[in-house]
Image (spheres, coloured by chain):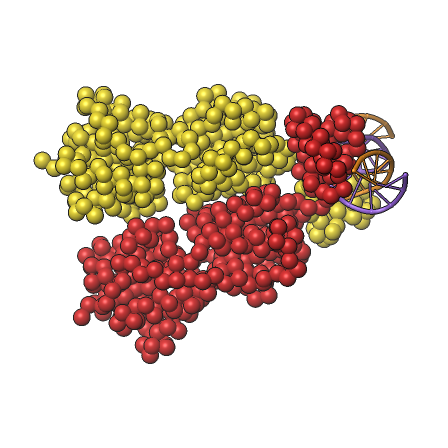
Chain colours: A yellow, B red, C purple, D orange
DNA sequence: CTGAAAGCGCTAACAT
DNA sequence: ATGTTAGCGCTTTCAG
C-alpha cells in the first residue's frame, strides 16, 4: 500500500510538503503542487483517513441518528444530508434506531459517538435532558432536524402552525366536526405533540368544541391510519373532516374511508402533513414541508460550524424554521349538507 | 480527553494490559480485567477509534452502497445490515447514489473506499468490469445484495424464478394476454433484466406468443407504474393481467386501473414482486421476498469473512439465494370471460 | 516556500 | 500474566 512517504521519496521532498500540496494548503508553489498531484496520482496514492484523523484530531465524519431509515421522511432527510456531506468530503456514519428505545439509549449513552465524529445530526427525536447532557459532552456541533430544542441548533418547520393551517382549511370549508389522527409513536418526538396542539388551538380559535374522542392514535403509519380512520369513520356521529398529522396516516384514513364506502371528499374530507411522494398519487390535500432541504440545511449548518463549508461566517443561525404551504388537492371539500 | 495512558497510570500498570483487558483478549487475569474495566468506566475512558485503526490496520467499518436510500426496498436492506453490523461493533458508512450515475462513478473510481473500510456491501447494482476491478483492488470482503455477480459473494433471490412464479400464476388463472411493467431504471441493475427474462420464459413455456408491445417501462416507481399501466390498459386489446416487476409499479398499475374505471381483479388482474409494506394494504398479490433478511445475511457474510462474527468458519458461502413465495391476495383472479 | 522532527493514542510483537 | 518498545501514517509546529 503506497503511503505519503513513497510519494515524498519519489519526488525527493518532505512528507510535509506532499501533505500540504495535496490538501491545498497555502505555502506551496504552484509548480510543486502540480508535480505532487501528478506523482500522487501516478503512484495511486490514497491518504489514510485513520492516520490523518489521529494526527489532526478531526474525523471528517458526521453521525446521523435516524429513528427509522425505512420511513420516507427520514430517508429523504438523510439523503439531503448525505448529498451535502459527501460534497464536502465528509463521511456519514449512520445510526438507525429502527424504533427501538434500547438502540436510542445505546447511541447516546454508551460513548458510541465520542471521538468518532466531528458533528451530529439528530432527526425528529425530542431529546431528554440526559441525552442533551451527553451531546453537550461531545463538545461538537449538533443540529436537530424536525424537533424544537431550545438553545440548540435546529432545522424544522413550525409544526403547530402547520397543523393549524391544515385544520383551518377544513374549518374554512365549513367543517365543524373534525377528527384528528396523530399519536405518540414509540419514541419521543416533537412533531406529534406540536401538531396536536395546533389542531386544538385551531378549533379553539374558531370557537369549536374540543371532543377528545375525536383524537385517535395512528402511530404515524399507514396501517395505524387505517385503524384510526376506521374508528373515527364508523361512528354514527362521524366527523366530516379528518386531519392526520402525517401523510402516511392520511393515506390510511383514505383507505379506511374506501373500505367503509365513504366517498372522498363528498362524505368525508381528509388531509395530512408532508407532501409525501405518494400524496399527489392519492390526490391528497396536504400541508407540504421541504424534506430534502431540511437535511441539506442541517448538514450545511454543522459544516459551517466546523468551518468546513465555503460560506464561513462567525454567526450561526441557531434555529432555522422553514415555511410550509397548503397544497389543495382533491381529498378535501365542503362537508356534506 | 482521557486516554488509555490515564487509565494505565491510575492503575499503575502498562497500557498494553489495559488494552488487552478492555478488548477481552486472553492473557489477563479475571481480577485485573475487572479492575481495569472499573477504572476505565470511572474515568469515562473511551478508546480512540482513529488510533486503534491506525495501529491495528482494521477500521471496524463497513461501507454500504445504496442506489436510493429513499426507496423502501433499499432502506429495508440497509436497516437489516445496520442492525447486524452495530451488534458486532462495526460502524456503517453510508454511500447513497440517489440514482446518480455520477455519484456511482465517484464511489467506485476515486479511491473513496480505500483505507476506509474493512468490507463493502453493494445493493442491487449490476457492477461493470471496471467497478469489479476497483473492488478487487480493495482486497476486502464484498457482498452484493440483489445482484447476480458470478464469482463474487451475493445474497439475493432468484429474480427470474420469481418473475416466472408471478407470470405462471396469471397463466394458471387462465390469462392469455399478460402485460409486463418493468424497465431499466437509471442505473444498471440485475433485477430488471432477470425479471423480464422470467416473464418471457414463462410465456414461452406455456406456448403463449410474445408481444413486445405488452412490455412497458415503469421505471420501478409508483408514478412510472401509473403511466405504464395507463398505456397498457387503455389499449382496445388490453391485457387481462399485468405483472409488474416491483410492488411499487404494481401499485401504480392499480391506480391506473382505477382511473380507467377498471375493476380489479374482475376486469384486470395485477401482481408484483416484493411484498412491499403497502402491498397488503392494497390487497396486492405479490411474490414475496425476504428484505430485512437479505441485509442481515449480507452483513453476517462479510463479518464472517472478517472473522468477526461468532460463527467463524473457513468456508464462505459465496452465493446465498433466498426463497420467494407467492402471496395470493385480492388483486388477481380469473380473466373476464 | 520547504524540511526536520515530534507526536497523535493506540496495538502488537517480543520480553520477562 | 504483565511490561517494554516500536511503530501505524499522517499532521503540525518550528526552523531555515
Q: Residue at x 67, y 29 (%)?
A: B38
| Horizontal side, residue B269 vs residue A42: left or right | left
Q: Quadrant of residue A21?
A: top right
The answer to whether D10 is drawn above or below residue B331 in the figure is above
The percent position of residue A272, horizontal first and vertical second, equals: 29, 37
Asked which quadrant contains residue A202, the reply is top left
Q: Can residue B288 be seen in the rendering of this structure? A: yes
Viewer-proximal residue among A215 and B134? A215
Please name whichever residue, A3 or A167, is drawn nearer the observer in this view of the structure: A167
As drawn, B49 above or below B147: above
Depth check, front residue: B278 or B104: B278
Instruction: Give left or right: position of B213 versus B107.
Output: left
On the image, the x and y values in percent for residue C3 come to: 84, 37
Residue A55 visible in the picture = no
Q: Residue at x 27, y 62 (%)?
A: B332
In x, y percent, where is residue A302? 54, 31
Nearer-the-camera pick, A66 or C14: C14
Location of residue A311 by image quarter: top right
Q: Classify B150 as above or below A44.
A: below
If the image is split into quadrants, where does the C terminus of chain A sit?
top left
Identify the residue at horizontal 49%, vertical 49% (top origin). Answer: B80
Q: Position of residue B8 (x, y in %)?
A: 76, 29
Amino acid at each position: 500500500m503506497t503511503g505519503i512517504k513513497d510519494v515524498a521519496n519519489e519526488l525527493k521532498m518532505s512528507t510535509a510538503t506532499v501533505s500540504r500540496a495535496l490538501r491545498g494548503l497555502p505555502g506551496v508553489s504552484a509548480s510543486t503542487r502540480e508535480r505532487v498531484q501528478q506523482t500522487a496520482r501516478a503512484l495511486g496514492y490514497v491518504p489514510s483517513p485513520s492516520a490523518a484523523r489521529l494526527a489532526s484530531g478531526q474525523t471528517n465524519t458526521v453521525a446521523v441518528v435516524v429513528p427509522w431509515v425505512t420511513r420516507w421522511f427520514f430517508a429523504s432527510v438523510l439523503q439531503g444530508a448525505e448529498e451535502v456531506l459527501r460534497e464536502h468530503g465528509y463521511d456519514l456514519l449512520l445510526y438507525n434506531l429502527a424504533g427501538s428505545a434500547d438502540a436510542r439509549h445505546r447511541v447516546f449513552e454508551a460513548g458510541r459517538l465520542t471521538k468518532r465524529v466531528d458533528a451530529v445530526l439528530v432527526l425528529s427525536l425530542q431529546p431528554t435532558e440526559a441525552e442533551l447532557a451527553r451531546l453537550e459532552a461531545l463538545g461538537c456541533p449538533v443540529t436537530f432536524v424536525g424537533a424544537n430544542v431550545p438553545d440548540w441548533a435546529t432545522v424544522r418547520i413550525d409544526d403547530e402552525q402547520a397543523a393549524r393551517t391544515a385544520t383551518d382549511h377544513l374549518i374554512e370549508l365549513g367543517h365543524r366536526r373534525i377528527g384528528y389522527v396523530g399519536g405518540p409513536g414509540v419514541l419521543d418526538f416533537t412533531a406529534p405533540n406540536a401538531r396536536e396542539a395546533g389542531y386544538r388551538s385551531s378549533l379553539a380559535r374558531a370557537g369549536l368544541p374540543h371532543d377528545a374522542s375525536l383524537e385517535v392514535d395512528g402511530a404515524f403509519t399507514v396501517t395505524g391510519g387505517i385503524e384510526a380512520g376506521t374508528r373515527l369513520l364508523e361512528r354514527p356521529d362521524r366527523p366530516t373532516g379528518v386531519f392526520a398529522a402525517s401523510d402516511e396516516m392520511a393515506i390510511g384514513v383514505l383507505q379506511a374511508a374506501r373500505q367503509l364506502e365513504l366517498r372522498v371528499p363528498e362524505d368525508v374530507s381528509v388531509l395530512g402533513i408532508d407532501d409525501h411522494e405518494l400524496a399527489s398519487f392519492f390526490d391528497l390535500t396536504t400541508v407540504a414541508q421541504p424534506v430534502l432541504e431540511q437535511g441539506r440545511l442541517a448538514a450545511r449548518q454543522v459544516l459551517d460550524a466546523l468551518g468546513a463549508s465555503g460560506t464561513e461566517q462567525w454567526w450561526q443561525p441557531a434555529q432555522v424554521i422553514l415555511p410550509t404551504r397548503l397544497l389543495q388537492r382533491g381529498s378535501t371539500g365542503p362537508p356534506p349538507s
